[in-house]
Amino acid sequence: MDQICVVTTVVDARSVADVLAAAAVTGRLAACAQVGGQVDSTYWWRSDVETSSEWSVQFKTAPDRVVALVDQLRANHPYQVPEILVSRVESGDPGYAAWVHEQTRP
């Protein structure tokens, strides 16, 4: 099975999530991107606990595209310190993994 990675982030607006998703897929940095429903996040920021509504985005990509995808997310993310997490998928459907790999080729 070809390895795949899932890269996740959150942003403060659905429109921003949609732009990040479209840019990654169009640029072949991700085979697909899923924008999840609104979530409420509680976190420390500037010595205070804050709560805000955010939109999650999951990107499915090949390991050799992760660095470029993360670089693009950092460059276009509205947050000063964006949450960008990378997870390697240990197992999954081999056909899906092959599709992810094919779709991330420039």
Image: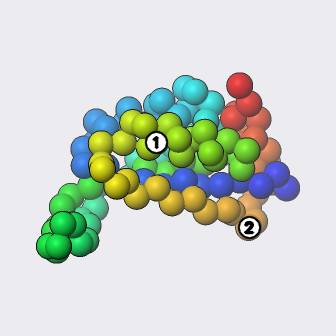
Q: Relative to 67, is 18 above or below?
A: above
The residue under the point 30% across, 42% down is 78
Number of marks in the image? 2
Q: Position of 56 compared to 46: left or right?
A: right
The residue under the point 75% across, 65% down is 91
Q: Position of 95 compared to 30: left or right?
A: right
Q: In which quarter of the image is the C terminus?
A: top right
The residue under the point 30% across, 49% down is 79
The residue type indicated by label 1 comes to: Leu
Q: Relative to 50, is 99 above or below?
A: above
The residue under the point 37% across, 53% down is 82
The residue type indicated by label 2 comes to: Glu
Say which of 71 and 23 sits in front: 71
Q: Residue 75 placed where, x, y %?
A: 43, 37
Q: Residue 68 placed where, x, y %?
A: 60, 39
Question: Marks 2 and 1, how far apart in space?
Answer: 24 Å
User: In the rendered image, which residue does mark 2 sit on?
Assistant: 90
C-beta proximity under 8 Å, tags 2 and 1: no
Q: Position of 48 compared to 23: left or right?
A: left
Under tag 2, what secondary structure? Answer: loop
